Image (cartoon, rainbow, N blue to C red):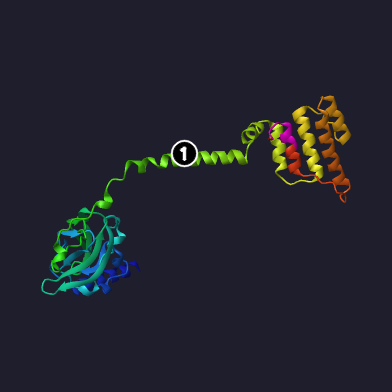
């Protein structure tokens, strides 16, 4: 069996040597997958070459660069594929775009021009990289390669778009006129100084208005440094029931004036304040407020009313922060 297979391969080689292929379709699928092979067949008896052709040595940055890969002589120009240059890193880093255009073929020389149009990424010298171009030699039954050497292009900055003065037109288009400069004269010195007293008066008025609206602002800032006062005022910023208002007052008196913590009822609080030698007027105010809280809590139908603002005013009055 092995001898039969060897004989068949030998016979196939003899047939290929006797009748060289004329189309790339006659090659095997594996052979066509060779690296850098773009389906080109060499003309019998002639070696194939490859070279870059650049019509313009210098191209502005905003114009397309015409680039051609000239290979040949080619036996099958209609089957040859143009290499995908943008898939190669060495080309992608130099060109932002590089697209193929229809190729041209010269039957007299057998040269095939694979043409491209592209844009450079930057201004300056642009070196078109070297490219390997593999081809198949039908008579020899093997692959060979041609190399297109690197080629340099100068990429220049785009020409500035400057609008030119028309040469054709009425005579007044070409007359030099002196501009009136009266409105460009230097302003008087008082105009620069005038805003200073205006700004100063505005600042003084704002400060006076602030003190009038908040006469005890400085005292309130100092009071908020006292933890017991700050906690009571912060708790009064949130709406609460009469029971909660009574608790805020008791906690304030315990933390600020040393009232015994066991004083929970109105009588206990009044008795405790008497022991720390509070004035009778203050004690009466506390007793009246706590009694009103008890009445609002246990007899909601009564006319007794208490509010957070009333308790806030009491605390600020005791701390000397009211006018």
Q: Which residues are magenta?
A: 314-322
**Crowding at mark 1 (Cα within 10 Å: few <14, some 14-19, many 20+):** few
The quarter in which the N terminus is drawn is bottom left
Of 294 and 17, which appears nearest the observer? 294
Q: Is residue 317 magenta?
A: yes
Specify whether residue 21 is in view.
no
Instruction: Please tell me which residue is depicted at 56% across the width and 39% down the height of the picture.
Output: 208
Q: Is residue 119 above or below residue 14?
A: above
Quarter-of-image position of residue 18: bottom left
On the image, the x and y values in percent for residue 276 come to 82, 25
The quarter in which the C terminus is drawn is top right
Of 24 and 120, which appears nearest the observer? 120
On the image, the x and y values in percent for residue 52 come to 17, 61
Mark 1 lies on residue: 200
On the image, the x and y values in percent for residue 269 come to 85, 32
Q: Is residue 21 above or below residue 221?
A: below
Specify whether residue 284 is in view.
yes
Total marks placed: 1
Of 18 and 78, which appears nearest the observer? 78
On the image, the x and y values in percent for residue 97 come to 28, 62
Element at label 1: helix
Residue that protrudes farthest toward the left in the picture: 108
Horizontal side of residue 169 vs 235, given as left or right = left
Q: Is residue 84 above or below residue 290?
A: below
Quarter-of-image position of residue 282: top right
Horizontal side of residue 299 vs 71, given as left or right = right
Q: Is residue 316 magenta?
A: yes
Instruction: Please tell me which residue is depicted at 13% across the width and 75% down the height of the picture.
Output: 107
Instruction: Please tell me which residue is depicted at 76% across the width and 33% down the height of the picture.
Output: 252
Quarter-of-image position of residue 267: top right
């Amino acid at each position: 069996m092995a001898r039969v297979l060897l004989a068949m391969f030998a016979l196939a080689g003899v047939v290929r040597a006797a009748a060289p292929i004329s189309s790339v379709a006659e090659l095997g699928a594996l052979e066509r997958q060779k690296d850098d092979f773009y389906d080109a067949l060499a003309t019998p008896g002639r070696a194939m070459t490859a070279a870059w052709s650049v019509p313009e040595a210098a191209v502005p940055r905003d114009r397309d660069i015409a680039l051609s890969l000239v290979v040949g002589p080619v036996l099958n120009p209609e089957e040859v594929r143009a290499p995908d240059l943008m898939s190669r890193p060495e080309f992608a880093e130099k060109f932002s775009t590089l697209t193929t255009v229809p190729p041209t073929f010269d039957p007299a020389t057998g040269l095939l021009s694979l043409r491209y149009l592209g844009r450079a990424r930057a201004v300056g010298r642009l070196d078109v990289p070297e490219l390997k171009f593999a081809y198949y030699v039908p008579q020899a039954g093997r692959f060979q390669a041609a190399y297109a050497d690197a080629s340099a292009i100068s990429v220049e900055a785009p020409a500035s778009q400057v609008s030119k003065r028309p040469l054709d037109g009425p005579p007044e288009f070409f007359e030099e006129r002196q501009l009136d400069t009266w409105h460009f004269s230097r302003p008087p010195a008082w105009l620069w100084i005038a805003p200073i007293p205006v700004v100063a008066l505005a600042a003084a008025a704002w400060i006076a208005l602030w003190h009038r609206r908040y006469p005890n602002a400085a005292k309130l800032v100092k009071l908020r440094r006292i933890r017991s006062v700050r906690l009571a005022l912060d708790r009064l910023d949130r709406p609460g029931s009469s029971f909660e208002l009574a608790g805020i007052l008791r906690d304030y008196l315990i933390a600020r004036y040393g009232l015994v913590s066991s004083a929970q009822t109105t009588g206990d609080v009044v008795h405790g304040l008497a022991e720390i030698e509070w004035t009778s007027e203050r004690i009466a105010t506390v007793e009246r407020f706590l009694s009103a809280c008890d009445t609002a809590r246990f007899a909601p139908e009564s006319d007794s009313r208490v509010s957070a603002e009333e308790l806030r005013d009491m605390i600020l009055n005791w701390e000397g922060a009211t006018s």
